[in-house]
Amino acid sequence: MTNQSLLIVNARIVNEDSITEGDVLVRDGRIERVGFGLTGTHADRVIDARGRHLLPGMIDDQVHFREPGLTHKGDIATESAAAVAGGITSFMDMPNTIPNATTRAALADKYLAAAGRARANFAFYLGGANDNIEEIRALRPEQACGVKVFMGASTGNMLVDDPVQLERIFTDCPLLIATHCEDTALIRANEAQARERYGEAVPPAAHPGIRSEESCWRSSSMAVDLARRHGARLHVLHLTTAREMALFEPGPVAGKRITAEVCVHHLLLDDSRYEDLGNLMKCNPAVKSAADRAALVAALREDRIDVVGTDHAPHGLREKEQSYLRAPAGLPLAQHALPMMLEHHHDGALTLETIVRKTSHAVADLFGIRERGYIREGYWADLVLVDLRRGTEVRGDELLYKVAWSPFEGTTFRSQVSCTLVNGVVAWEDGALTGEIPGRRLECHAAR
Ligand code: DOR
């Protein structure tokens, strides 16, 4: 049931680079008060959060919820349910759907489809294409969270490989440009070599050699060069290599023209896992070495990398069980997003404050998201209670994804998302969905 007012008491509030014990009063969807000694204040419901941490919900800047056209893999209803279970209170969805979201009309249809069905708040990217520069030029910041440009081919055939169009997009795009960076020509050459060596039986462990460090470097350094030359606002998605870290400046998001994202799986997995996970961890860009993984974590600490997303990209298990060359790239991740990030806290590699900055504050700043991403009076109450003393066992029968598998089945993460509030409404609590569907459209202003 929706409570008009909700009081959370005795929480350890992780917000704006500090952790303080306190209470939060939520009314009509928003945070009314943050303080001490609010016990006794009237509220329709009181949650005693003693021993638990209260975080602003994760804003995931990269998901593939597969709607429209690929809804056998996932849809906004199913995947947003998994998202709230994982502590995600807002998501930004990618355009490689069918049809591709390359027009403002297709975008408008996506917003319509999400209304009343999303458990978390939502925004959509327009897709760049070789032939839609007029759509891009006409786009207004309130219509999309950004323009996604596949500078490397991946799922969905949305490669922008015409150099003239790329120049035009970087010159004229009125919004932030978010890129997938891998050099497709080099990948094709690497794949041809692998076929010569293995025939059709190329093993999954060949993936990071095919989608190689050099292929990432060529494309991401080209994106950075284009952005510098044209003064574009660039956000490079899912970085995977130590070498690419040199392309980004350390420091806060404010004032940066070029920003970067890493993803939860690239921060936890490395190439030693291809042996047991095989195609289940095949994704683009590929998971690389342990040294690369460590460099990504270090770059988060240095504020060289600004935000963390999931790149939640479900494919059916049958598809993934095909040979390496046939298996699609991408994995479902949203349901364990925050528990995965909190592993770095348990390891002593990232503080809770840093995790909150990367999953929430900086994402809100980077995309100009109105009144979200912080625990502040007057802001929307997108909040997550996590318990660092209780684990989350990843069990097949508890997965909410339409594809119903996870690369982490059998793993126990050391934290638990015990409650997720979206717009002040409890959407997930004690291991179960509440049935509430409180997601709203995000108000973003990621202008050039
Ligand atoms: O592994 C990936 N899967 N990388 C992408 O860029 C796309 C995604 C998908 O949509 O399946």
Image: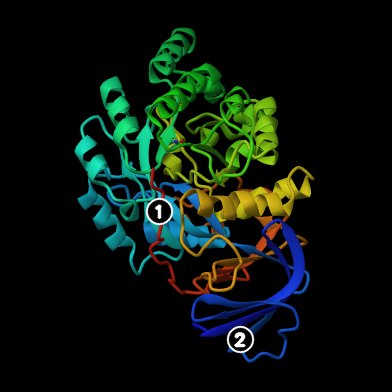
Looking at the image, residue 407 lies above or below residue 12: above
Mark 2: give few (<14), some (14-19) or many (20+) Cα within 10 Å.
Answer: some
The number of callouts visible is 2
Q: Is residue 440 left or right of residue 364?
A: left
The amino acid beneath tag 2 is Arg
Q: Considering the numbered disc 1 on the image, is that residue within a helix, a strand or a loop? A: loop
Mark 2 or mark 1, which has the lower sequence index?
Answer: 2
Q: CA distance from mark 2 to mark 1?
A: 34 Å
Q: Nearer the viewer, residue 296 or 225?
A: 225
Looking at the image, residue 376 lies above or below residue 301: below
Residue shown at 50%/76% (left/top)?
A: 29
Quarter placement of the C terminus: top left
The answer to whether any part of residue 158 appears in the image is no
Q: Considering the numbered disc 2 on the image, is that residue within a helix, a strand or a loop? A: strand
Mark 1: give few (<14), some (14-19) or many (20+) Cα within 10 Å.
Answer: many
Q: Quadrant of residue 39?
A: bottom right
| Residue 411 coordinates in the image, percent (x, y) | 67, 48
The answer to whether any part of residue 214 appears in the image is yes
Q: Is residue 348 left or right of residue 329?
A: right
Query: Which of the numbered marks, if any, corresponds to residue 45?
Result: 2
Q: Nearer the viewer, residue 289 or 142?
A: 142
Ligand 1 image-quadrant field: top left
Query: Which of the numbered marks, if any, corresponds to residue 280?
Result: none
Q: Which residue is identified by label 1? A: 445
